[in-house]
Image (tube, grey):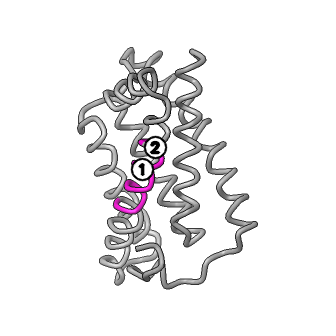
Amino acid sequence: IFKEKLTSIDSSDKISIKKSAIIVFLAVVVTIIIFYLLTYIIYDVLGSSVNSAAAIYIRDMYMRNKFIYVIFTFFTVTFEEVVYRKLLFGYLYDLHSGCNKYVRFITSALVSSIIFGATHDGVFHPAMITYVVYGVVFSSVYFYTKRISASMTVHVLNNLFLAMMDIFGI
């Protein structure tokens, strides 16, 4: 599935590995900043809990077996990026081929990100806001680099950052 050209995004020329690495680094920094801002807004301003059911489940899994946690993390990130970015976002992007390029990208990124967020904790959970923002960032990285591996890397690093925050209680 990684070598096939499923969508017009895959058919485009990929940017260099060096530029992709810079974009991945910047995307990770942006997601960390966004996470802190959203946590502040949701928890301090709105007075709601930021902990999602998915995060609690993953934290419990880490406490039980660290090896299974690592395998689970890489498997789920790969699955989520292929399904939500490569297949769903790519399909929606191609579906809107007659639209303005900005409308095409924004619509595809938002719809795929809302579905991504809804599958984690449901539509009405406050943590969905962060999942939607993450989905838009991951879609942007995939779209700009034309590499699903770049969005997978951002996703893995983001999850590892969040896991480290849970482990060290930051």
Q: Quadrant of residue 60?
A: top left
Q: Quadrant of residue 87?
A: bottom left
Residue flagged by tag 1: what amino acid is it?
Phe
| x and y percentages locating residue 132 in the rendered image | 39, 45
Along the viewing direction, whichever of 97 and 121 lies nearer the viewer = 121
Assess whether residue 79 is covered by the magenta stretch.
yes
Q: Residues within 10 Å of mark 2 (few under 14, many from 20)?
A: few
Local SS, label 1: helix
| x and y percentages locating residue 149 in the rendered image | 55, 63
| x and y percentages locating residue 46 in the rendered image | 39, 19
Q: Residue furthest right?
A: 18
Along the viewing direction, whichever of 103 and 55 lies nearer the viewer = 55
168 to the left or right of 84: right
Q: Residues within 10 Å of mark 1 (few under 14, many from 20)?
A: few
Determine whether 149 is above or below 126 in the image.
below
Q: Main secondary structure of the magenta part?
A: helix
Residue marked by disc 1: 75
Residue drawn at (57%, 24%) of the image: 165
Magenta span: 72-83
Residue marked by disc 2: 71
Residue drawn at (68%, 50%) of the image: 26
Residue drawn at (56%, 41%) of the image: 158
Along the viewing direction, whichever of 54 and 37 lies nearer the viewer = 54
Along the viewing direction, whichever of 66 and 14 lies nearer the viewer = 66
Q: Quadrant of residue 133?
A: top left
